[in-house]
Image (cartoon, helix red, strand yellow):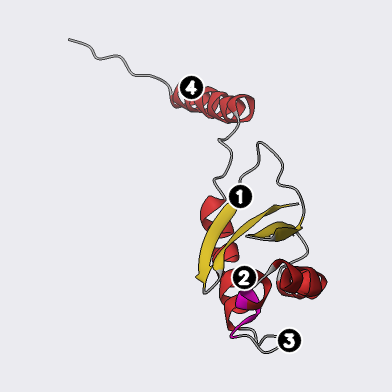
């Protein structure tokens, strides 16, 4: 009995066709969008940690406690809170910090991944959202 052999060039051509097909399929189908929520949650948590350890400007326990104390305290401290957040976060992040008496930052857009954390204070809970600009 005689055995047939495939030529090496035919095998190489077949592998080449499969490789080109695989690369083309990857470009056509694309890759799934990255889930950034873990990193964004970390940014939100880090921001909450910084703000909850910041010294207050007017004698409360922390900066977060100060902005949740009363509507007047929030109104007085909102601009300083916003400025502090801008110094802490990277330029490619947007944010929203919501207290019982109001919020600072940007309106949260629909359909984007975001990170969130909540921090209780003696006067209420502060919610922080961050997302990529």
Region in magenta: 61-65
Q: Earlier in the sequence, mark 2 or mark 4?
A: 4
Q: Earlier in the sequence, mark 1 or mark 4?
A: 4
Q: Secondary structure at mark 1?
A: loop
Q: Nearer the viewer, mark 1 or mark 4?
A: 1
Relative to 126, does residue 22 appear above or below in the rendering?
Answer: above
Q: Earlier in the sequence, mark 3 or mark 1?
A: 3
Q: Position of residue 89 (x, y in %)?
A: 71, 69
- Please name the residue that numbered disc 4 is placed on: 14
Graded by Cα atoms within 10 Å as few (under 14), some (14 to 19) or many (20 or more), the crowding at tag 4 reads few
Q: Secondary structure at mark 4?
A: helix
Look at the numbered discs 3 and 1 and tell me whether their residues touch, using CB distance below 8 Å. Answer: no
In the image, 31 versus 4, the foreground residue is: 31
- Please name the residue that numbered disc 1 is placed on: 114
Q: Label 2 to label 1, Cα distance in Å? A: 14 Å
Q: Earlier in the sequence, mark 3 or mark 2?
A: 2
- Please name the residue that numbered disc 3 is placed on: 57
Question: Which residue is painted at 67% across and 70% down in the image?
Answer: 70
Task: Report which quarter residue 105 is drawn in.
Answer: bottom right
Graded by Cα atoms within 10 Å as few (under 14), some (14 to 19) or many (20 or more), the crowding at tag 3 reads few
Q: Label 3 to label 2, Cα distance in Å? A: 18 Å
Q: Label 3 to label 1, Cα distance in Å? A: 29 Å
- Please name the residue that numbered disc 2 is placed on: 47
Look at the numbered discs 2 and 4 and tell me whether their residues touch, using CB distance below 8 Å. Answer: no
Q: Nearer the viewer, mark 2 or mark 4?
A: 2
Q: Main secondary structure of the magenta part?
A: helix
Q: Label 3 to label 4, Cα distance in Å? A: 72 Å
Relative to 95, does residue 79 appear above or below in the rendering?
Answer: below
Question: Which residue is painted at 63% across and 60% down in the image?
Answer: 100
Q: Please check the rendered image and state whether residue 38 is part of the magenta-colored stretch, yes or no.
A: no
Q: Secondary structure at mark 3?
A: loop
Relative to 1, does residue 97 appear above or below in the rendering?
Answer: below
């Amino acid at each position: 009995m005689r055995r047939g052999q495939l030529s090496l060039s035919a095998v190489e051509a077949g592998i080449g066709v499969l490789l080109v097909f695989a690369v083309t399929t990857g470009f056509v189908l694309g890759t799934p969008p990255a889930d950034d929520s873990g990193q964004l949650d970390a940014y939100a948590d880090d921001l909450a940690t910084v703000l909850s350890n910041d010294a207050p400007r007017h004698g409360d326990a922390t900066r977060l406690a100060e902005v949740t104390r009363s509507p007047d305290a929030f109104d007085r401290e909102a601009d300083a809170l916003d400025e502090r957040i801008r110094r802490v976060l990277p330029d490619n992040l947007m944010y929203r910090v919501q207290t019982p008496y109001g919020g600072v930052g940007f309106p949260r857009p629909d359909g984007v991944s975001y990170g969130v954390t909540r921090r209780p204070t003696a006067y209420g809970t502060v919610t922080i959202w961050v997302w990529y600009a």
